Image: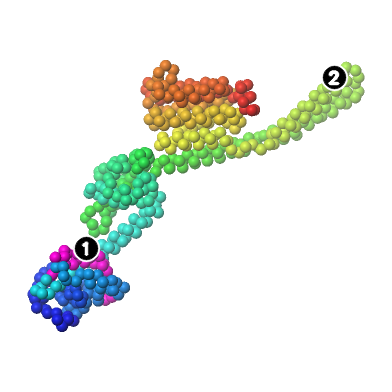
Amino acid sequence: MSGSAEFSLSGVSDMAPILSAVAQAALIVNPETGEIVLANTRAAELFLCSVEKLETLVVEDLIPRRSGAEHVALRGKFLPGDITRKMAKGRAVVARLWDGSEKSLVVSLGNMQLGSQSLVLTLLRDVTATRSRDDSMLHILEALNYIEIGLIVLKSDPLVIVHANERACRLSGYNLEDLVGRSLGTLGIAFSEDSLLPEPGVKGSSGHRPISEQSMMRQDGLVAPVQVEFARLRPEDSPSDGVLMIFRDLLARRRMENARRASELQEEEERRLRLVGRERDRIARDFHDTVIQQLFGTGLNLQGLAARSEGDVKERLERSIADLDSTITEIRSAIFDLHQPISAVDEVRIRVMQVVEEAERNLGFPCAVHFEGSTTDLPQIVVDEMIPVLREGLSNVVKHSRAESVSVTLSADSSLHLAIHDDGVGFDWVGSSPRGHQYGIENMEARALRLGGFLEFKSSKKGGTFLLWQVPLFSRDTAVQSSD
């Protein structure tokens, strides 16, 4: 043994039976020199060498060289002198085994006094397997941040949040630090253990996972519709388990569906316009190849008759020829107009869909939208009055109706009809106006009256409200204001 000349083994050998009885690897160390004074068989098994070999080493021989100097400095702070120092528990270190490999250990230290000799009792616990699982879980949790689905990990008993990925934080409006330690009730999410039915014979399987639509309460107070499912987590070699909550933002999904629907609507409109364009080209060719040629031939015949006629007959024939020339000129002008390109985008429908999508974000569900007739040639003054009416009408539905479905219909013929229908609680009527909504309704009505139209409200005792805003499209006032 490499003890110092002034160091005596008197009394230390009496500790050998006690050290052997300790249930984990243990060493007795001289804190001043780092010499291992005594070791038990569990320590020898841990470091893959004999007890006799361990008792010839200093503790730095059991530390990787990269950490040796740091350990000497730490050991120097643990010199005897404060024998009342409490046990230092749970310090994580990396140890070097006799074969050169490494292990993760948790070390607990405590001062002990043997006569005049101050020593340090060192207890060692191998946590390599645990650290490996922890490191794997850490990598898994870090990987969760790259998944565009909200994921929240919950400890089973009690059911509290222990981790959430970045997507979950964004959807809930909380920072990770604010979420950890909270219950699902904070987010307004309901969970039942009965919903987790393990699949027979498959370890770690969650089995049947019912999917539900719930309302998540964000940190900012807003309510976000989400699709939720739960899966049981049971780590390897662990008696405890947890729960993984998987949720998707339904509002984002509905916005995507609305965008897809708007795109399909635009494609449909473009197909319709292409068909109309082809039909206009066909009509233009027919006019040019058939009608104009026939009129031109008739004119030539009349010119021949006029040359051989006199008096009143000649004068009448010449007037007919002039009328034919005028008709041919008008037809050629119409053919030219038919060949002009048609606007490929219906701006009115796009503006309507933008207002509806804005309302859907607050309603939490999609609206049914229907278009009837052409809206490409509406007077601008009518469109500028109709869009605010649509926005106000949908705003009333969002604020007051508590509806579960809403439909919007825009139809155009000799008049423009805007209809909004919901299945909500309806209005409490006072006279001819619904209570609490006079200002908005008066505003919508004024916009109709300015164009010679009207506003109509209907509300059933069973619930539901129907709004109809109608204005003529070809009145004198509309035409004058449109031209201005």
The quadrant holding residue 461 is: top left
In the image, what residue occupies the spot 51% across and 30% down?
388
Left or right: 325 as drawn, with respect to 74: right
Kind of element beneath mark 1: strand
Q: Quick one: 334 or 33, which is closer to the camera? A: 33
Screen quadrant of the N terminus: bottom left
Q: Is residue 183 visible?
A: yes
Q: Amino acid at mark 1?
A: Gly
Screen quadrant of the C terminus: top right
**First to last magenta residue range:** 84-112
Q: Position of residue 198 (x, y in %)?
A: 26, 49
In the image, what residue occupies the spot 33% across and 50% down?
176
In the image, what residue occupies the spot 36% across and 54% down?
144
Left or right: 326 as drawn, with respect to 103: right
Q: Position of residue 181 (x, y in %)?
A: 27, 49
Check disc 2: other Cα within 10 Å, few if <14, some if 14-19, many if 20+: few
**Residue where numbered disc 1 is placed:** 90
Check disc 1: other Cα within 10 Å, few if <14, some if 14-19, many if 20+: some
**Residue where numbered disc 2 is placed:** 316
Q: Position of residue 143 (x, y in %)?
A: 37, 56
Camera-nearest label, 1 or 2: 1
Q: Quick one: 115 or 481, which is closer to the camera? A: 115
Q: Position of residue 214 (x, y in %)?
A: 34, 39
Distance between mark 1 and mark 2 Cα atoms: 120 Å
Q: Is residue 24 visible?
A: no
